[in-house]
Amino acid sequence: PNADFEELSIYQNRKKLENLIKIKSTGDCNEVHTDCAIALEVWTGKLLKNKPSTNSEPMGLLISFNWGRKIQLYISATGMYTRINQGAEDRNTWLSWVKCSN
């Protein structure tokens, strides 16, 4: 390949990386992100909507994975939970949160 081919390849790879991970601030665990492969939402001092009902920590991290089946991890100081999105994979088709054991 010549130099032009290499520059195009670097540009295409950079565009792919820009859509890999995004920081979000929706305030709602039921949001479905389709503009990235991994969405991160950090919160402090407020509770996210549609969080696990057994967790009342005021800070933590929500990680949403968007490849194949949509999957979420909800991590706080006192626990970690997970769930998947079934069916139409929209904000109304999330299954219940399941607490991960230690």
Image (spheres, grey):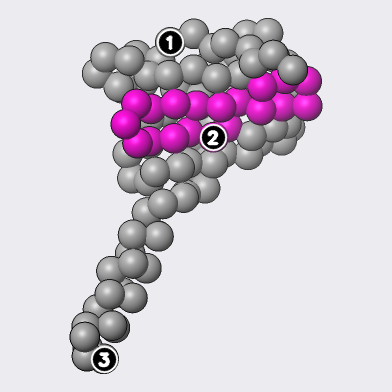
How crowded is the residue under tag 2: few (<14 C-alpha within 10 Å), some, or many (20+)? some
Residues under numbered marks 3 and 1 in contact, where contact means CB atoms less than 8 Å apart? no
In percent of width and height, residue 35 lies at 33, 45
Q: Mark 3 or mark 2: which comes first in sequence?
A: 3
Q: Position of residue 57 (x, y in %)?
A: 75, 22
Q: Which residue is mark 2?
A: 63
Amino acid type at image mark 1? Leu
Amino acid beneath label 2 = Ile
Q: Quadrant of residue 60?
A: top right
Residue at position x 63%, y 12% in the image: 99
Q: CA distance from mark 2 to mark 1?
A: 16 Å
Q: Marks 3 and 1, how far apart in space?
A: 50 Å
Q: Is 66 rendered above or below residue 93?
A: below
Picture quarter with the C terminus: top right
Residue 66 is a magenta residue = yes
Eyeballing the image, is 27 above or below 99?
below
Q: Which residue is mark 3?
A: 3
Q: Position of residue 94 (x, y in %)?
A: 40, 15
The magenta region covers 62-80
Res 58 seen here: no
